[in-house]
């Protein structure tokens, strides 16, 4: 049986370039890359294009906040989303008390409680990503632990991921703003609308999307399975998962 076409949903802030930075060489040219930094790239538009382009079905990969977009797309595709890999997934916040253990917790709390202030912060982060992407990446990696601590010391990784931020959030902050505001709302009902095979890839040292999120998704999605990645944090979990997916 031929492998299903791969579709990748990047994290936020992030961009399609994450794929080339973190995927194994054999996978780098093999995926359809969604760009959620473009406000016009709604999950409805993405699902419609995928259904037309791949009538035999697809395998969706959602990384971090990209899991939110991947799950909504899978719900729209129905049985055409035959498999779904959620890597370092951002689960609905209403499934547990996750924010105190999330490095990005203050941003999500602000988006939920003060959306106007969050919009101002998102615009400012977009300006940083456009003009000083290396500085912004340094802030994002400041609390790196597990496998991410090693990546944070890699000049090549930092240079390429800074370019991802510049070309994504730095190009248009509105996609990030829209995605985060939608994410902090209650979207638990989407989980029951996904019919494909679901695998959750979770680093046990992740402080961006903590292991409790992976376990909560496992409990909320009967039939899903959890693959724990020892020593992995966030981007290091993405690399470990893609190595096994490929």
Image (spheres, grey):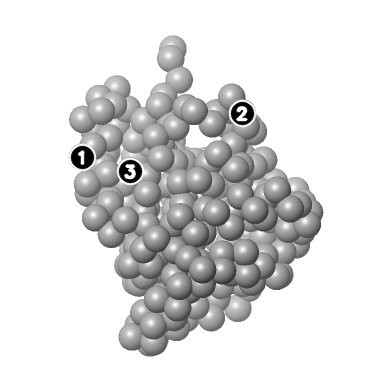
Neighbourhood count class around disc 1 (C-alpha, 10 Å): few under 14, some 14–19, many 20 upward:
few
Q: In the image, residue 57 lies at what x, y percent?
A: 32, 27
Pointers 3 and 1 in contact (CB under 8 A)? no
The alpha-carbon separation of the residues under discs 1 and 2 comes to: 29 Å
**Quick check: 125 above or below 215?**
below
Q: Residue furthest front?
A: 131
Q: In the image, residue 48 lies at what x, y percent?
A: 21, 40
Location of the C terminus by quadrant is: top right
Q: In the image, residue 205 lies at what x, y percent?
A: 72, 59
The alpha-carbon separation of the residues under discs 3 and 1 comes to: 11 Å
Residue holding disc 3: 74
Q: Earlier in the sequence, mark 1 or mark 2?
A: 2
Residue at 67 percent across and 40 percent down: it is 240
Image mark for residue 48: 1
Residue at 70 percent across and 48 percent down: it is 156
In this rendered view, identify the residue nearer to me: 172 or 200: 172
Looking at the image, residue 180 sits to the left or right of residue 103; the answer is left
Q: Earlier in the sequence, mark 3 or mark 1?
A: 1
The answer to whether residue 141 is seen in the rendering is: yes
Image mark for residue 25: 2
Neighbourhood count class around disc 3 (C-alpha, 10 Å): few under 14, some 14–19, many 20 upward:
many
């Amino acid at each position: 049986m031929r492998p299903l076409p791969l579709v990748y949903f990047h994290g936020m802030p992030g961009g399609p370039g994450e794929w080339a930075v973190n995927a194994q060489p054999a996978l780098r040219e093999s995926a359809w890359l969604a760009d959620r930094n473009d406000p016009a790239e709604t999950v409805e538009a993405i699902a419609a294009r995928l259904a037309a382009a791949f009538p035999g079905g697809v395998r969706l990969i959602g990384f971090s906040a990209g899991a939110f977009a991947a799950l909504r797309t899978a719900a729209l595709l129905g049985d055409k989303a035959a498999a779904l890999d959620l890597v370092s997934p951002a689960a609905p916040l209403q499934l547990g008390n996750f924010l105190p253990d999330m490095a990005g917790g203050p941003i999500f709390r602000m988006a939920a409680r003060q959306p106007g202030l969050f919009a101002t912060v998102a615009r400012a982060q977009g300006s940083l990503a456009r003009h000083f992407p290396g500085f912004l990446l340094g802030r994002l990696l400041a609390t790196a632990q597990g496998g991410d601590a090693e990546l944070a010391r890699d000049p090549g990784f930092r240079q390429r991921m800074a370019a991802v931020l510049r070309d994504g959030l730095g190009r248009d902050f509105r996609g990030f703003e829209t995605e985060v505001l939608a994410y902090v709302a209650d979207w638990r009902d989407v989980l029951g609308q996904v019919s494909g095979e679901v695998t959750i890839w979770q680093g046990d040292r992740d402080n961006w999307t903590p292991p409790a999120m992976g376990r909560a998704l496992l409990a909320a999605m009967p039939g899903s399975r959890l693959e724990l990645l020892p020593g992995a944090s966030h981007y290091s979990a993405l690399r470990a998962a893609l190595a096994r997916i490929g």
